[in-house]
Amino acid sequence: MSKRSGRAALARALRRLEPPPRVVDWAIAVAVAVEVASGLYSFTRGTPSGAWVFWLHSTVGLTLAGLVGFKLYRVRRRVTSTAAWDRFTPLSVLQAVVTLAALGTGVFWVLGGNVPVLAWTTLNLHVGLGLLLVPLVLWHLRGRFHSPRDVDLDRRAALRTGALLVAGTVVWRATETADRALGGATRRFTGSKPTGDLYDTETEGGGFPVTSWVADDPDPVDRDDWTLSVRGLVEEELALPYDEVAGNGPTREVEATLDCTSGWYTHQTWGGVRVGDLLDSAGASDDARYVRFTSVTGYRWSLPIEEAHDALLATHVRGDPLSHGHGAPVRLVAPGRRGFQWVKWVESMEVRKRGDPMQWLVTLISGFE
Ligand SMILES: Nc1nc2c(c(=O)[nH]1)N[C@H]1C(S)=C(S)[C@@H](COP(=O)(O)O)O[C@H]1N2
Ligand SMILES: [Mo]
């Protein structure tokens, strides 16, 4: 087949598969919304029962790639001839670039790639680009808005859009299989990779990176000056010095996986005191529903009380007392939760009736003056 007739055949095939323009445009907006929502929601999923949200994210992401392909093919002349540019075109081009970069970094990460930029993994970059799409898409809709009522979603258009979604699923399954065959199966369902794949930590005896979510960086906490305060809905408030928390060595050891949303995980043996034992000593009241753990920096997270019972306030990791960077004297170990919820440098444990929606904001701004 000559080059020209090959291209004509491709154009014909694309035309046959292409959903109508308005359907493509709205499907892109919906897909981006689904990606941002599922991406953010995935930050809260740390157990395999939450794996579906990662599947959804991958499948819709690949479908979005197909939609963007159709879109770019359709508008190619409007972009390549600058005479056709209007004041919204530069922003549209920027949006296309950011979308492709967000998709590209996501796929690259899944296929085993990582090109760190300063402290950022490629997964961090993927998240940043994805969030950048929110204002860009809203802006784009403002400039090029077509009412959803104009969307000509007849049976055929619905079938074609559905076919794209199926294609997205097939490609996703295929990459998963290929990845497993190529030995990339060390990725967790969250997308995180073993620390040793990303950082040169294995040489330090199974160490793992010290990270802050945003800006927390306190001075080392003096174990002798520190007490753990247990308060709130309890019969008796406690202020426990380090020796009473750590005792003659940890009273409990737990194996748990620390899985950071920047894309690494580490499996460690943590030693410390079971939160349930502390709750029993203090005597939690009947209407207690949550336990909130707060760091010396103000950073905090709450767990439902049943879950808190089985969590650990760790003083040790791999048999050694925690280092400052990993949260000494005491950090929260919350199995099944993502890394950012494992509060470091804990100084108080508060039994409460309600959860704490503000904790989301606080984890982002703690550490700033
Ligand atoms: N007080 C406080 N605790 C924190 C953080 C933080 O910034 N401040 N970062 C969290 C994040 S995002 C992760 S992944 C883990 C990292 O623990 P590590 O530094 O021991 O590896 O701690 C969590 N606990
Ligand atoms: Mo993290």
Image: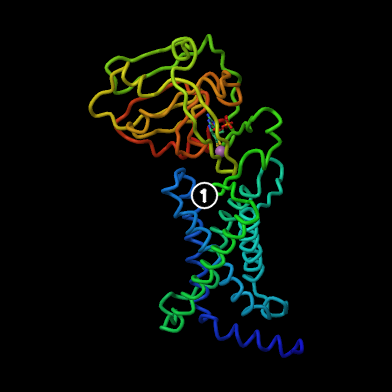
**What number of labels is visible?**
1
Foreground pick, 120 / 254: 254
Question: What scheme was used to colour the molecule?
Answer: rainbow
Ligand 2 falls in quadrant: top right
Residue 7 place in picture, x, y as percent: 70, 85
Q: Residue furthest left?
A: 286
Residue 356 place in picture, x, y as percent: 38, 36
Residue 10 location, quadrant: bottom right
Q: Is residue 147 above or below residue 255?
A: below
SS under mark 1 = loop
Q: Residue furthest front?
A: 181
Residue 45 location, quadrant: top left
Residue 105 place in picture, x, y as percent: 64, 56
Residue at (53, 68) in percent of width and height: 170
Residue 154 place in picture, x, y as percent: 41, 83
Residue at (72, 77) in percent of width and height: 80
Q: Is residue 128 above or below residue 325?
A: below
What amino acid is labelled 1 in the image?
A: Phe
User: Which quarter of the rendering shows the C terminus?
Assistant: top right
Foreground pick, 296 / 249: 249
Q: Residue furthest right?
A: 2
Characterize the local packing of mark 1: few (<14), some (14-19) or many (20 or more) Cα atoms within 10 angstroms. Answer: some
User: Which quarter of the rendering shows the N terminus?
Assistant: bottom right
Residue holding disc 1: 189
Residue at (51, 80) in percent of width and height: 19
Foreground pick, 166 / 128: 166
